[in-house]
RNA sequence: GCCGAAGUGGCGGAAUUGGUAGACGCGCACGACUCAAAAUCGUGUUCUUUCGGGAGUGUGGGUUCGAUUCCCACCUUCGGUACCA
């Protein structure tokens, strides 16, 4: 889905910056619950300021009235508008690799080292364009209800957006004029707070650290800040943290509790400050136990538990004025109390964060923005779009670490103003490409009104779950925005979604010493300190690395050294999704060359249910090839002579055909293609057995088969004498009369185990079936003269005798 | 860790609403055809067995006349975890 080689299709591309401009020129009005032009927001500001505006904006947006707005400098006004725009620049933490001079994706970083080359990576703040997707958090969640998507996919998106109700509470810092605001969903446990924790990234740490603790705190932050969020979340068992030397006051009890810094608190969620209640939160409990901090039980039933977090809800104890209330009532009561006393307010929090839109790469759509001397971003006028990627001498970052576009010579708007140097991410294009497909030649708009109204939204989207929290969320956001602004007419882009499984690959890994350009063979890695890197599977045979090919692969490996075992370098392996970034891709070209496209197509369908993931493996493809040959043999003999005859089919032959028609029809409805392929095999085997070469049968079979093996079906169709394409032939109608049975072979079970089978007419009443079953020789033997306790007869299914 | 999914023969998998576990295919074994091989065709193929049977759908429990299917707990693998898209 990546739209990478962007400058190849300028017609397609130029629409994208227009989207960007629209987002820049819009804000989200929470009153009308949709995106509106920023111009109308400015009008309101001029008339009455922003005190009555309910809109999505930055947390630190000041309140002002009309006269204050008018008195502001243009720069100040622009700065305030940026706090409302749906795309805006902000500082975001990125993975910076000084050695490579580039920013890396999280999955390009392993244990703090770059996947490529194995160089150290640090986390660094950089100016990035953001998309205010959080404005849409509620609609993105609520709309899911009406979509025909799997519940698991809806769950994933709902959890990712992560709406939670709670409150913010202010804790005053002792002897300092600072209050720390924390977000909590459990204000009911406020009387159980025994310490407070800051994220290592928190801005006020330096100010809040006592001189005695400074060295320790600084050392801790240095270490913690370079760990990835994922690592910090994953390693809950390794507790770490450090005391700041400061104390804060619990506003409910006026009790002083120590203030700590710990990396289990993430800066990106809530306020980066957590009130710790070891008696009801697992992480807090582990932390408190580890550092010997007190644990105060506040929920009835936890008093005698060694681990009080086993019970998280109940009646409050030891909790001042909320003692005796249950958790739910206590939440309400504490929020009311906090609001009345001015140290807190109820708050809805989302886990979802605004999306980083900038990439420090060359191959992406340029952001249509230039900067004036005051640092303020300005949009390029529409008639000057598209902004094209400038030529550069190398597609690499500059020596000083600026993005590749900084290499462009004299690349300035009106020869004067510098352009934005980051480019757009893959999801900028993947969010709306289906709209463009509706009207690909339109050079006036992203997509014309007539085209959107004709094609509507996507009826059926087949995509993997790996897109759950990325592409499929961005795309919905983008489409919803276009809907709000009247460019499209469906709020949701994908009505029905089916998750196909992923074809996995078998990746090969090599092990580089952390400190040297030396690679250790797989069997010896326990003796060294290594990082795991990929080797391309195409230079590995039976997990043995072709060392020369590996050295030639990348310049940084050219003079690598190798520590071998038994004279060879053995690689590790891992089964995971097939992906360019994992260097485990294989092309199906050779398979198509050998077996043909129909065979490969059917084999892929035959592999298993569409929603299952599995490693790519071509062992079974011969079976499908044989099937196609058998099919061919129904039409032609060994000498290539047509066998087809015009005789009237027998009942048996119709039965075989119509069973297949019925099964495949059902299967297509359920996207169960693997069982259709089986059914075709059964059908062809049966027709071969019957020596059936009758046109009436073969013709209909071909039509049913044609979506599965289009080329061969078309060719045989022509062989039967048709001039028109098989694609135009009407689909055969299933006729139940051909497959009806008048008897059924009942499995006879004794105590739930199948012991024999008896055939009964379908008309026979259950009573007679029961009587005849009990007379049966095999049943008699198992009864051993005893009387059965119970006999269950399920028509057309089974007979079970309970002894 | 958290969120989501999946575990059935040597392998990919099948099994309408809870009703014959292993369809179909790969592989393997044996046989036919052949001077021989390939191709093709045929037979067999869950394990175990004292040949009566017994066990069996990741593990341990539960509900039921009957569980791959429903419930509870756990294990393993895969996807996502915010710059792969």
Image (cartoon, rainbow, N blue to C red):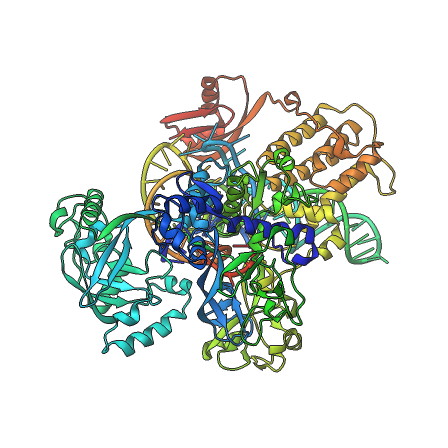
Quadrant housing residue A262: bottom left
Q: Nearer the viewer, residue A517 or A95?
A: A95
A405 sits to left or right of A30: right
Q: Nearer the viewer, residue A540 or A160?
A: A160
Q: Residue A74, percent across and down?
A: 45, 57
Does residue A84 appear in the picture of this structure? Answer: yes
Instruction: Work out whether A72 lies above or below A46.
Output: below
Q: Nearer the viewer, residue B40 or A516?
A: A516
Residue occupying the point 43% across, 32% down: A750
Instruction: Work out whether A40 lies above or below A278.
Output: above
Instruction: Work out whether A65 lies above or below A74.
Output: above
Quadrant housing residue A412: bottom right
A759 sits to left or right of A794: right
Query: How many callouts does the rendering have?
Result: 0
A86 sits to left or right of B42: left
Instruction: Work out whether B5 lies above or below A356.
Output: above
Does residue A609 appear in the picture of this structure? Answer: no
Residue occupying the point 83% across, 26% down: A646
Q: Residue B15, percent across and down?
A: 53, 37
Residue occupying the point 48% across, 78% down: A514
Residue occupying the point 49% across, 73% down: A531
Q: Quadrant of the C terminus of chain A?
A: top left
Q: Residue B65, percent across and down?
A: 37, 32
Q: Residue A599, percent across and down?
A: 71, 47
């Amino acid at each position: 889905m990546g739209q990478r080689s962007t400058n190849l299709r300028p017609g397609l591309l130029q629409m994208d910056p227009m989207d960007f401009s629209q987002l820049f020129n819009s804000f989200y009005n929470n009153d009308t619950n949709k995106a509106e032009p920023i111009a109308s927001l400015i009008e309101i500001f001029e008339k009455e300021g922003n005190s009555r505006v309910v809109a999505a904006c930055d947390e630190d947006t000041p309140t002002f009235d009309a006269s204050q707005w008018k008195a502001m400098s243009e720069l100040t006004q622009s700065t305030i508008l940026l706090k409302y725009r749906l795309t805006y620049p902000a500082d975001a933490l990125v993975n910076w690799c000084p050695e490579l001079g580039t920013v890396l994706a999280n999955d390009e970083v392993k244990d703090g080292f770059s996947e490529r080359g194995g160089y150290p990576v640090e986390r660094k703040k950089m100016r990035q364009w953001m998309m205010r997707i959080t404005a849409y958090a509620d609609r993105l969640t609520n709309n899911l209800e009406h979509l025909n998507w799997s519940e698991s996919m809806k769950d994933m998106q709902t959890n990712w957006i992560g709406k939670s109700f709670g409150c913010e509470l202010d804790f005053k810092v002792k002897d300092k004029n600072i209050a720390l605001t924390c977000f909590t969903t459990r204000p009911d446990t406020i009387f159980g707070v025994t310490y407070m924790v800051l994220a290592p990234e928190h801005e006020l740490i330096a100010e809040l650290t006592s001189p005695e603790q400074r060295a320790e705190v600084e050392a801790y932050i240095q270490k913690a800040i370079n760990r990835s969020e994922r690592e910090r979340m994953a390693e809950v068992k390794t507790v770490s943290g450090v005391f700041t030397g400061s104390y804060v006051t619990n506003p409910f009890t006026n009790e002083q509790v120590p203030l700590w810094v710990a990396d289990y608190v993430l800066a990106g969620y809530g306020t980066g400050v957590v009130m710790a209640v070891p008696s009801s939160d697992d992480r807090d409990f582990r932390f408190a136990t580890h550092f010997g901090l007190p644990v105060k039980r506040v929920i009835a039933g936890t008093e005698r538990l060694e681990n009080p977090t086993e019970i998280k809800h109940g009646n409050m104890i030891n909790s001042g004025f909320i003692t005796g209330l249950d958790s739910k009532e206590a939440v309400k009561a504490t929020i009311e109390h906090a609001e009345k006393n001015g140290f807190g307010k109820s708050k809805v929090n989302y886990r979802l964060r605004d999306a980083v839109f900038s990439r420090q790469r060359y191959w992406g759509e340029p952001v249509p923005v230039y900067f004036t001397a005051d640092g303020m971003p300005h949009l390029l006028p529409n008639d000057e779009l598209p902004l094209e990627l400038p030529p550069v001498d190398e597609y690499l970052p500059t020596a000083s670490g600026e993005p590749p576009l900084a290499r462009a010579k004299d690349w300035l708007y009106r020869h004067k103003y510098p352009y934005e140097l980051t480019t757009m991410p893959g999801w900028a294009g993947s969010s709306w490409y289906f709209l463009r497909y509706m009207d690909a030649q339109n050079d006036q708009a992203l997509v014309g009104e007539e085209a959107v109204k004709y094609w509507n939204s996507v009826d059926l989207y087949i995509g993997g779950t790996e897109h759950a929290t990325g592409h499929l969320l961005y795309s919905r956001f983008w489409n919803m925005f276009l809907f709000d602004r009247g460019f499209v007419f469906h709020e949701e882009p994908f009505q029905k979604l089916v998750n196909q499984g992923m074809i996995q690959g078998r990746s090969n890994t090599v092990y580089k010493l952390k400190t040297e350009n030396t690679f250790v063979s797989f069997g010896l890695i326990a003796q060294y300190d290594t990082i795991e890197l990929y080797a391309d599977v195409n230079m590995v045979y039976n997990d043995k690395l072709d060392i020369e090919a590996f050295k030639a692969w990348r310049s940084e490996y050219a003079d690598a050294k190798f520590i071998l075992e038994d004279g060879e370098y053995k690689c590790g392996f891992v089964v995971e999704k097939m992906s360019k970034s994992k260097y485990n891709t294989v092309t199906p070209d050779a398979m198509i060359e050998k077996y043909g496209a129909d065979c490969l197509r059917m084999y892929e369908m035959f592999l298993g249910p569409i929603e299952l993931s599995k490693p790519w493996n071509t062992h079974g493809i011969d079976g499908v090839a044989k099937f196609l040959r058998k099919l061919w043999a129904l039409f032609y003999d060994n000498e290539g002579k047509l066998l087809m005859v015009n005789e009237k089919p027998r009942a048996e032959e119709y039965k075989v055909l119509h069973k297949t028609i019925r099964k495949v029809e059902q299967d297509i409805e359920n996207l169960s293609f693997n069982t259709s392929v089986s059914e075709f095999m059964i059908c062809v085997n049966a027709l071969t057995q019957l020596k059936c070469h009758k046109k009436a049968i073969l013709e209909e079979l071909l039509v049913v088969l044609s979506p599965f093996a289009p080329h061969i079906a078309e060719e045989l169709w022509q062989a039967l004498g048709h001039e028109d394409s098989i694609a135009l032939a009407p689909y055969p109608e299933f006729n139940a009369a051909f497959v009806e049975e008048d008897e059924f072979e009942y499995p006879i079970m004794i105590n739930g185990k199948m012991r024999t089978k008896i055939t009964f007419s379908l008309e026979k009443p259950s009573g007679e079936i029961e009587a005849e079953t009990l007379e049966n020789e095999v049943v008699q033997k198992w009864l051993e003269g005893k009387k059965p306790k119970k006999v269950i007869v399920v028509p057309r299914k089974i007979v079970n005798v309970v002894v």
